[in-house]
Image (cartoon, rainbow, N blue to C red):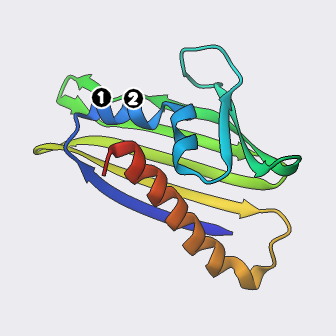
Amino acid sequence: MAVFRIERTAPLSPDAAWRRLTHWAAHSAHVPLTTITVTTPPPTRVGTTFVARTGLGPLGFDDVMRVVRWEPPGAGAAGATAGRCRIEKRGRAVAGWAEFEVEARAGGCRVVWRGEVRPRGLPRPLGPLATRSARWLYGRILDGLLGR
């Protein structure tokens, strides 16, 4: 099991960062050997599903994901509200979840990405390696999507 937390700031509005983070197919550009396909019609909402296919030729696996929380950033009675999204991983090879929060900060926004990745069949002693790998991979995705 790999549990991780990543935090970034970006000179983007929360809405712009949200649009980039929730453009699921765009994640493919930052994950080696992976193509992401949204399998439900737009717009994204609770229930949206997408599949990350990682592999080379016929060898690979599908990471099936479903949006279970969808709260875009907006303006509430007390001012700007943070956006929150949670995704559950339901693939046969990888289980777990990922969630991110986008909130306004002076000069841009702050993004906090948390997750748990459970590669099926991974021996427990390799857990720390899985955590470092997940932190690196999701940090790469976040940096790429935010233009860092």
Of 18 and 27, which appears nearest the observer? 27
Instruction: Give the residue type that dot 2 points to.
Output: Arg
Residue at 65% over, 72% down: 130
Residue at 51% over, 57% down: 138
Image x and y of residue 137, in percent: 54, 60
Q: Which residue is mark 1?
A: 15
Q: Is residue 1 above or below residue 147?
A: below
Image x and y of residue 100, in percent: 44, 46
Image x and y of residue 58, in percent: 89, 46
Alpha-carbon neighbours of circle 1 within 10 Å: few (<14), some, or many (≥20)? some
Left or right? Give the position of 50 relative to 22. right
Outermost residue, bottom direction?
Answer: 125
- Which element is circle 1 on? helix
Residue at 62% over, 80% down: 128
Of 90 and 107, which appears nearest the observer? 107
Instruction: Give the residue type that dot 1 points to.
Output: Asp
Q: Which residue is mark 2?
A: 19
Q: Are the residues tagged 1 and 2 within 8 Å (C-beta)?
A: yes
The total number of labels drawn is 2
Left or right? Give the position of 71 relative to 117. left
Q: Is residue 68 above or below residue 127?
A: above
Residue 17 image-quadrant placement: top left
Gap between marks 1 and 2 measured at Cα = 6 Å
Outermost residue, right direction?
Answer: 58
Residue at 66% over, 60% down: 117
Picture quarter with the N terminus = bottom right
Alpha-carbon neighbours of circle 2 within 10 Å: few (<14), some, or many (≥20)? few
Image x and y of residue 115, in percent: 55, 57
Of 141 and 122, which appears nearest the observer? 141
